[in-house]
Image (cartoon, rainbow, N blue to C red):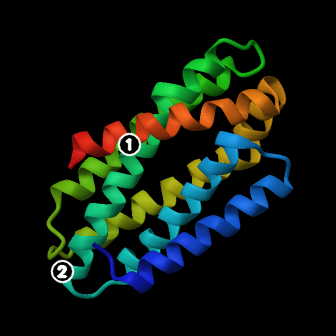
Amino acid sequence: MPNPIQNAVAKVTGKAAGVEARLKGLKGVFAKLAEQHHEVGALLSNAESATDHTTRRELWQKIRKELLSHEQGELLEIYPVLEGYDATREIARQHADQAGELEGLIRQVDAIGVQSDAWRPALERLIARVKEHVQKEEEDFFLRAQAALGDEAARQLEKPFLRAQDLVKERLA
């Protein structure tokens, strides 16, 4: 596990992003997703700067679980709902493509040992793609989805998303 300070900083970063998302008008699951994006972003930054293999390994195990459970939770609970709306159907399709690419990059980082010189460049490629994905979701997809679904539906999607995410985490453990 990352050290308690790294965890605390990541949590605070995530909570601040969640507040910012709500100020932009995002509700329920969309604010929660933004919160999680920034929390894992902080952990990714810590992993990128980590110099010892033990810290890298511990951070990567947590990051991997968070990224995969987040993406799978979205694919299971959020994007199928968006498929049902004309205004968001294309968003769901674009997201599915991006999720597959992200999972491929995660597998690449997994395949390289944390002690390898190739690990950091692989992680940097993943970080760059995660940043692009987050930007697209938070500045486009989520705003359009929020408008299509409405506040109440966005709130109602949060619990099923979190349950799906927890189930994926259990499977990954």
Please report the residue visible at 38 percent of the width from the left and 42 percent of the height from the top. Answer: 166
**Element on which disc 2 rests:** helix
Where residue 138 appears, as percent x and y from the top left, is 70, 48
Image quarter of residue 140: top right
Is 159 above or below relative to 40?
A: above
Distance in Å between CA atoms under marks 2 and 1: 26 Å
* Quadrant in the rendering for residue 44: bottom left
Give me the disc on residue 132: none
Tell me the residue at 82%/28% (across/down).
Answer: 150
Disc 2 or 1, which lies upstream in sequence?
2
Q: Amino acid at mark 2?
A: Thr
Q: Quadrant of the N terminus?
A: bottom left
Q: Which residue is mark 2?
A: 54
Q: Nearer the viewer, residue 11 or 127?
A: 11
For mark 1, give the secondary structure: helix
Is 8 situated above or below 124? below
For the residue carrying disc 1, how many other residues have a C-alpha within 10 Å: few (<14), some (14-19), or many (20+)?
Answer: some
> Residue 14 appears at what percent x and percent y?
60, 65
In the visual, does 48 lie left or right of 9? Answer: left
Residue ID for mark 1? 166
The residue mark sitting in front, 2 or 1, is 1
- Between 145 and 48, the one lying in front of the other is 145
Q: Position of residue 63 (x, y in %)?
A: 36, 61
